Amino acid sequence: MADPRRPILAQQFDLAVRAFRDGWHILRYRGPSQIQFWFIALVIGIAAGFGALGFRMGIDALQAWLYGTEDVQRLHSYAEHLPWYWILLIPVAGGLVVGVILHLFTPDGRVRAVADVIEGAAMGNGRVEKRAGFASIAASLITLGSGGSSGREGPVVHMAGVMSTWISNRIHADGITGRDLLGCAVAAAVSASFNAPIAGALFALEVVLRHFAVHAFAPIVIASIAGTVISRMEYGDVTEFVLTTPGSLQFYVELPAFLILGLLSGLIAVLLMRGIFLAEDVGSQLQGWLHLPRWLRPGVSGAMLGGLAIFFPHIIGVGYETTSLALSGAFPLREAIVFALVKALAVAITFGGRMGGGVFSPSLMVGALSGLAFGLVATGVLPDVSGTSTLYAFAGMGAVAAAVLGAPISTTMIVFELTGDWQIGIAVMASVSLSTALASRLVDRSFFLTQLERRGIHLAAGPQAYLLAMLRAGAVMRPVTDPRCAEEGPCREMVAQGLCIEASATLEAAMPIFDRAEVDFVPVILRGTDEAPPEILGALYQVDALKAYNRALAATAAEEHS
């Protein structure tokens, strides 16, 4: 504490000396390790950047080979002139190959994507599945190359997670370091995939890590920059979409229209998400009723997509050509509405058939078409006080995508970086803010967190909800050798009454027992055979469970605010 009798300058000098001494200590004893970590972040950023670049080039090469076109950016225009049976057969063949890959290399026939990376960050110490991850990358590559209607961001994010998992295991990284490395890999992959360094870094923090801790910011930015450099070495510093009609707000009186568009976009995003979940449920029910082998499910979806693509070839692949046309105002009102509906149906079929891919690019396309349709109506009703309809397409694209991802900050930035137009931020921010606010109330925060909630993983509610599922009763119990453990007699009586829990169970299952039975402890058992009684391993006390839970909460808060 400063001495009030000393001069102010002397006190400030002492503070400066103390700060310099502390800074020198950090630089001397902690600096090298931090610099080493930043070097690892740079390496993983380069690796993830090359991985995302290779994935994108692989999709382009497969599409060019299957559809016989050299300009895959105009795939849907070229596909209009192909024989109908070819458009039908390509997705069917792709779906069958995808089904075989997932059947052989995943335990559940499901493609891994962004939701699994979020789960790995929160509950897996920054690790994801590697074997299933490689299979998902191959399946998504074939899905997108053969006409599946999804996006490439989901596969590249999980591919980045596989890379960071390999490095984390090699250096025996703890949970915090593993999560930071995961964030670095994701940032680089997103940046390389979309040439969006700012949005890549923000996506890793906002969506995957779900915090903005200072200690993670610098390495993630370094990795994001590295991924962008890798992408620009191949494609140059070009935007994904080229706007032929620049948009600008005519009057601030037009802003209420963008607020209304935001609410409408939130509802559209919710319908898109629920349509996907409905398709997954219906697909699983039909698979059970028809006794359909799981490897055949993607092939059936491929047949449905092929039949739809015969009449609407714009649903093939990522759909950036159609999105660019929507941002240029190339569609009349009827076509914009119909194309948006058909694209949403195609996305639901793709995900319902477990074919692979991401949801971000489809949400951009649906949002751009929906925004254009709204803009055509708005500018037609009030032409004297409104700008161009393309401005509404721009805002709608960001609003729907932000609501689907549950990431208003990173989505706003990625839309700006995809188009290179920074002059209409007010319109985009107005729409994005209301769309995410509305959609987050109607689903569990986002598409990814709702996916996890449907699997029984409660990340949407925050650490206080999912940390109990990370703590095992066997790790928190007092073993029978502990003198503080309950005696065997009372434990046997409680086991006979059914008041017990297995060692592999989590505290999420144990805590309701304490409330329901009003007991201080429950025996922890290892079940035996039908003839042998269960073995008592120890006792789980409520006070110990609460202490472990509080320690986990404190560690999570410390990481998020460090």
Image (cartoon, rainbow, N blue to C red):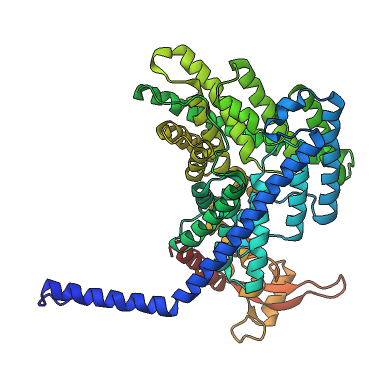
User: Is residue 552 shown above or below 324?
Assistant: below
Numbered circles on residues, count: 0
Residue 434 showing in the rendered view: yes
Work out whether residue 356 or residue 54 is closer to the camera in this orientation and state it: 54
Position of 396 with respect to 447 (left or right) is left
Position of 112 with respect to 238 (left or right) is right
Where residue 332 sits in the image (x, y, percent)?
A: 59, 16
Location of the C terminus (image quadrant): bottom left
Where residue 5 sits in the image (x, y, percent)?
A: 9, 77
User: Is residue 227 shown above or below 541?
Assistant: above
Work out whether residue 241 or residue 390 is closer to the camera in this orientation and state it: 241
Where residue 387 sits in the image (x, y, percent)?
A: 43, 20
Residue 352 showing in the rendered view: no
- Specify the quadrant of the image occupied by residue 486: bottom right
- Residue at the spot 60% in from the left edge and 25% down from the top edge: 325
Where residue 278 sits in the image (x, y, percent)?
A: 71, 36
Work out whether residue 371 or residue 60 is closer to the camera in this orientation and state it: 60
Location of the N terminus (image quadrant): bottom left
User: Is residue 543 shown above or below 76?
Assistant: below
Position of 514 with respect to 259 (left or right) is right
- Specify the quadrant of the image occupied by residue 331: top right
Work out whether residue 454 or residue 318 is closer to the camera in this orientation and state it: 318
User: Is residue 503 shown above or below 128?
Assistant: below
